[in-house]
């Protein structure tokens, strides 16, 4: 985020060089360990929420993954508050945040064959965190942001404005960032060492990369958007891992544990449920095509196969809401929340349906719960609508202003509502009036509409101070000003010297 760039830059000038705790190399370190931990702590939950939330049908699976992770972490030599979660997402992926916050998707776990391959994945991600790869990516960005700080702050269309929506952009960026080849090479190199020291067969790091290369060549659906986007596989990485295994053997660092049976037992539930999740994914695809009846059939199939999955009930609620069946949707969201009360989307969807049913108190409670888990433009916009319906304009303005920061259709709708509601009260916030002279000595006022929303009945007050007659106040009717445009009107002058002048929009409305 731009807001944090300058403090980080100044801190970096004081911090100077440091020794990387994994590689032992000297490097510039702007972001210290405590800052990394805080960055991870603040962004871990929002990142999980954006990617399906935690997988909860089989809690023992997360316990198992965390156990493997801790076994690998014990050999990293870097003391961080490591955490491991399994995300309820079919796209095969895994990621690490600064400070040791790691996640692996359900969709990746179903593609692995043994515990050693899981250890290879986690060792790779542990290295990203331990070797400061995420922090270094941020440091490279903060240098440029510091230079652009003065130009970026205060502009509605800046990334800084978009990031104000609860820092969601930072969480997303930390998860989806693409590391450079050196960082990937380091993570393969040291991650393989950590897993071998933990007793796992390091050859699993080779078979893992071979599997990734094969799947990337087949362009299996979803992979290009997941692990392959952030950690692209290659034949070079396979050969590097193979050479690393030989190097570790020469050093006497090798293990033999594959953990095939343990892994198969631990992942049995998600493997058995693959047909259910396939139906769930098919339902989501049908929703994107607005084939709601098809989507309903697919999600009902998923529910028959696995009725304990909250995501299935939540998606059924989405379908019924989109079909206008709001009472049914509320029932489905109730079932979802009963199985998982920690995922924002269920509250958000139920809130929309409650609002459609004129159950405003219930809607407000749901939107509030949703915002606590993951602040979104949709929830802020809906809260604005509720506040406006209750006649609370100040509260509505605050919610619309928050939602308007999003660079999407919801943000645009919220901005329109914000301007419509607040413009008559505070026109100076959304307009700019400037006086200027032409070459003939005539005086003009230029009125600029700083929003994309068309304005009408724009009225300007011009204050002039004359050398002989003192101050004069003029009222000028400007008329209509299109969104993002300006109009110019001539200001009548007296036959005496003008000492000073200023102009301000005093009234305006939207169309």
Image (tube, rainbow, N blue to C red):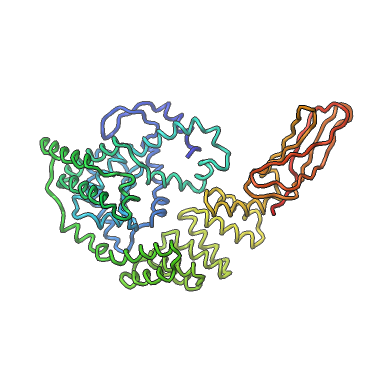
* Point 19% across, 38% down: residue: 240
* Point 51% across, 62% down: residue: 366
Q: Is residue 292 left or right of residue 84?
A: right
Location of the C terminus by quadrant is bottom right
Q: Position of residue 315 (x, y in %)?
A: 41, 65
Q: Is residue 208 left or right of residue 478?
A: left
Residue 349 seen in the figure: yes
Q: Position of residue 43 (x, y in %)?
A: 41, 47
Q: Give the mark count.
A: 0
* Point 70% across, 43% down: residue: 428
* 212 vs 440: above or below: below
- Quarter of the view holding residue 499: top right
Please state which of residues 423 and 194 is positioned toward the viewer in this rendering.
423
Residue 75 seen in the figure: no
* 279 vs 156: above or below: below
Q: Is residue 425 left or right of residue 476?
A: left
Q: Is residue 193 left or right of residue 464?
A: left
Please state which of residues 212 and 118 is positioned toward the viewer in this rendering.
212
* Point 79% across, 45% down: residue: 477
Please state which of residues 173 and 337 is positioned toward the viewer in this rendering.
173
Q: Position of residue 248 (x, y in %)?
A: 14, 38
* 326 vs 41: above or below: below
- Quarter of the view holding residue 242: top left
Q: Position of residue 202 (x, y in %)?
A: 16, 44
């Amino acid at each position: 985020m731009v807001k944090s760039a300058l403090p980080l830059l100044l801190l970096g000038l004081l911090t100077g060089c440091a020794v990387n705790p994994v590689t032992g190399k000297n490097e510039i370190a702007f972001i210290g360990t405590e800052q990394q931990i805080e960055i991870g702590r603040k962004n871990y939950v929002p990142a999980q929420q954006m990617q399906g939330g935690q997988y909860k049908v089989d809690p023992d699976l997360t316990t198992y993954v965390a156990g493997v992770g801790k076994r690998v972490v014990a050999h990293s030599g870097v003391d961080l508050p490591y955490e491991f979660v399994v995300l309820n997402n079919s796209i095969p992926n895994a990621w690490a945040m600064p400070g040791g916050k790691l996640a692996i998707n359900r969709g990746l776990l179903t593609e692995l064959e043994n515990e050693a391959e899981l250890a290879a994945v986690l060792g790779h991600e542990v290295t990203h965190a331990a070797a400061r790869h995420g922090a270094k990516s941020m440091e490279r960005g903060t240098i440029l942001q510091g230079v652009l700080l003065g130009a970026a702050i205060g502009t509605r269309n800046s990334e800084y404005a978009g990031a104000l929506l609860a820092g969601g952009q930072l969480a997303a960026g930390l998860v989806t960032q693409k590391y450079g080849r050196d960082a990937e090479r380091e993570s393969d190199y040291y991650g393989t060492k950590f897993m071998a020291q933990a007793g796992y067969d390091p050859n699993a790091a080779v078979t893992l990369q071979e599997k990734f290369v094969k799947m990337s060549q087949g362009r299996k659906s979803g992979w290009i958007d997941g692990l392959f986007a952030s950690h692209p596989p290659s034949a070079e990485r396979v050969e590097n891992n193979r050479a690393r295994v030989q190097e570790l053997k020469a050093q006497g660092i090798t293990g033999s544990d594959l953990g095939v049976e343990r892994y198969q037992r631990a992942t049995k539930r998600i493997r058995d449920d693959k047909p259910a999740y396939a139906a769930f994914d098919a339902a989501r695809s049908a929703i994107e095509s607005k084939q709601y009846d098809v989507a309903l059939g697919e999600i009902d199939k998923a529910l028959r196969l696995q009725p304990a999955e909250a995501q299935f009930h939540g998606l059924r609620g989405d379908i019924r809401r989109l079909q206008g069946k709001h009472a049914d949707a509320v029932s489905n969201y109730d079932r979802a929340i009963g199985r998982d009360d920690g995922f924002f989307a269920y509250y958000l969807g139920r809130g929309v349906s409650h609002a459609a049913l004129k159950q405003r108190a219930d809607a407000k409670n749901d939107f509030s719960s949703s915002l606590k888990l993951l602040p979104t433009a949709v929830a802020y916009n809906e809260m604005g609508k509720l506040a406006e319906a209750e006649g609370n304009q100040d509260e509505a303005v605050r919610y619309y202003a928050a939602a308007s920061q999003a660079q999407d259709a919801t943000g645009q709708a919220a901005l329109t509502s914000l301007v419509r509601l607040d413009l008559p009260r505070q026109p100076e916030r959304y307009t700019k009036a400037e006086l200027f002279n032409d070459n003939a000595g005539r005086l003009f006022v230029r009125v600029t509409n700083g929003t994309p929303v068309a304005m009408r009945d724009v009225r300007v007050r011009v204050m002039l101070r004359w050398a002989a007659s003192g101050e004069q106040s003029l009222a000028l009717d400007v008329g209509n000003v299109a969104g993002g445009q300006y109009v110019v009107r001539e200001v009548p002058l007296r036959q005496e010297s003008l000492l000073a002048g200023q102009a301000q929009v005093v009234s305006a409305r939207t169309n």
